[in-house]
Image: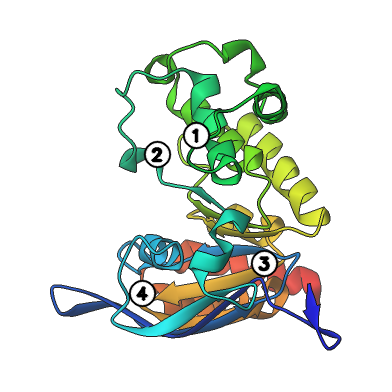
C-alpha cells in the first residue's frame, strides 16, 4: 500500500501517553514501523510493554497522542490487525473447543450475521496445522498445556489473515522446540510482507529473532534496526543497574559484528 510512491508505514505512534490513576505508564512514545518488519519490544517489568500493545489495539485509553494503522485510524483498519494477548489474561475455563477458538479469528471478515462456513473452517484447520495442533481441534481449550494454549491463540491470529500482528509474549510457557517452530512461522509471515510486533523477555534470543527492536522503559530508549540498538550502553539505559549478564550478551554480539 502506498501513496504517491511513498510506502505507508504499518504502524505510526506519535507522542503516546498512557496513565493509570494519573500516573504515567507510557510517556511520549514515538515510533514508525515499516511494513514487512519483525519488531521485538523489550524492557524491564513495569516498562509499559503490554500497555503499548493494548493501547495500539484500543484496549487501553490514551491520555495523549495518536496511533495510525496503515495510515488510518485503527477503527478503519481493525480487520487488518491480529492480536495475541498474554496467556495469563485469558479465562481458560470458558467451555470452548480448540477449533472454535481459532474460528473466532474469522469473525471480523464475516460480519455480525454470517456464521463460519466450509471455507472458514478450512482456514482455521490450516492455521491449527501450522502450529502443529491439528490433532487437538476438538479438545477443550482448558485441557491443553500452557504452551499449547499459546499456540491456539497464535493459530487464531493466523486465521485472521492480518497484515499487522501484535503479540504479547507469545513464547511464554512454551518449550525451546516449540519456540523455535513459532519463530520460523513468524519469519514466514514476515517474508509475506506482514508486520509483527512482539513483546519478548529473553534478551539472549532477541537479537537473533528480530529485524528491529524497541527498547522501552516508559519512554522509548531506542528504536531501530537490531544491530544498531542492541548495544550494552542502550540496554543499560533501558534496564538500569540490573543488567550485568545481559549487557555482556550485547557486548558479545557487538564484537561478533566487528
Instruction: Residue 67 in the image: state x and y as whole percent.
Output: 49, 77
> Local crowd at mark 4 within 10 Å, few (<14), some, or many (≥20)?
few
Mark 2 or mark 1: name the one nearer the start of the chain: 2
Real-space Cα separation, disc 2 to disc 1, in angstroms: 6 Å
> Local crowd at mark 1 within 10 Å, few (<14), some, or many (≥20)?
many
Which quadrant: the N terminus?
bottom right
Real-space Cα separation, disc 2 to disc 4, in angstroms: 29 Å
Q: How many marks?
A: 4
Q: Nearer the viewer, mark 3 or mark 1?
A: 1
Q: Secondary structure at mark 4?
A: loop
Regarding residue 42, the answer to whether it shows in the image is: yes
Real-space Cα separation, disc 3 to disc 1, in angstroms: 32 Å
185 above or below 204?
above
Instruction: Residue 136 in the image: state x and y as whole percent.
Output: 57, 13
Report which residue position mark 3 lands on: 252
Q: Secondary structure at mark 2?
A: helix
Q: Nearer the viewer, mark 4 or mark 1?
A: 1
> Local crowd at mark 2 within 10 Å, few (<14), some, or many (≥20)?
some
Instruction: Residue 106 in the image: state x and y as whole percent.
Output: 59, 37
Mark number, residue 241: 4
Real-space Cα separation, disc 4 to disc 3, in angstroms: 18 Å
Report which residue position mark 2 lands on: 87
**Residue at image location 54% in from the left, 39% down from the top:** 107
Quadrant of res 121: top right
**Residue at image location 72% in from the left, 30% down from the top:** 130
Mark number, residue 150: 1
| Left or right, 164 with reference to 91 | right
Amino acid at each position: 500500500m502506498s501513496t504517491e510512491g511513498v510506502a505507508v508505514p504499518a504502524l505510526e505512534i506519535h507522542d503516546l501517553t498512557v496513565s493509570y490513576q494519573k500516573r504515567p505508564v507510557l510517556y511520549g512514545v514515538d515510533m514508525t514501523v515499516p511494513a514487512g518488519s519483525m519488531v521485538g519490544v523489550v524492557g524491564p517489568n513495569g516498562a509499559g510493554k503490554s500497555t503499548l500493545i493494548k493501547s495500539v489495539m484500543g484496549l487501553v485509553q490514551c491520555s495523549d497522542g495518536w496511533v495510525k494503522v496503515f495510515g488510518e485510524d485503527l477503527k478503519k483498519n481493525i480487520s487488518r490487525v491480529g492480536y495475541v494477548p498474554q496467556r495469563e489474561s485469558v479465562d481458560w475455563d470458558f467451555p470452548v473447543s480448540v477449533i472454535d477458538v481459532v474460528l473466532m479469528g474469522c469473525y471480523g471478515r464475516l460480519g455480525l450475521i454470517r456464521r463460519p462456513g466450509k471455507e472458514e473452517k478450512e482456514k482455521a484447520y490450516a492455521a491449527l496445522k501450522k502450529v502443529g495442533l491439528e490433532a487437538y481441534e476438538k479438545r477443550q481449550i482448558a485441557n491443553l498445556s500452557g504452551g499449547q494454549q499459546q499456540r491456539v491463540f497464535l493459530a487464531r491470529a493466523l486465521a485472521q489473515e492480518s497484515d499487522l500482528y501484535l503479540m504479547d509474549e507469545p513464547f511464554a510457557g512454551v518449550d525451546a522446540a516449540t519456540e523455535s517452530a513459532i519463530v520460523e512461522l513468524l519469519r514466514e509471515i514476515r517474508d509475506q510482507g506482514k508486520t509483527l510486533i512482539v513483546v519478548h523477555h529473553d534478551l539472549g534470543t532477541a537479537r537473533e529473532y528480530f529485524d528491529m527492536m524497541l527498547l522501552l522503559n516508559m519512554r522509548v530508549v531506542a528504536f531501530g534496526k537490531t544491530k544498531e540498538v542492541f548495544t550494552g550502553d542502550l540496554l543499560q539505559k533501558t534496564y538500569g543497574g540490573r543488567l550485568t549478564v545481559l549487557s555482556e550478551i550485547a557486548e558479545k554480539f557487538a564484537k561478533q559484528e566487528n
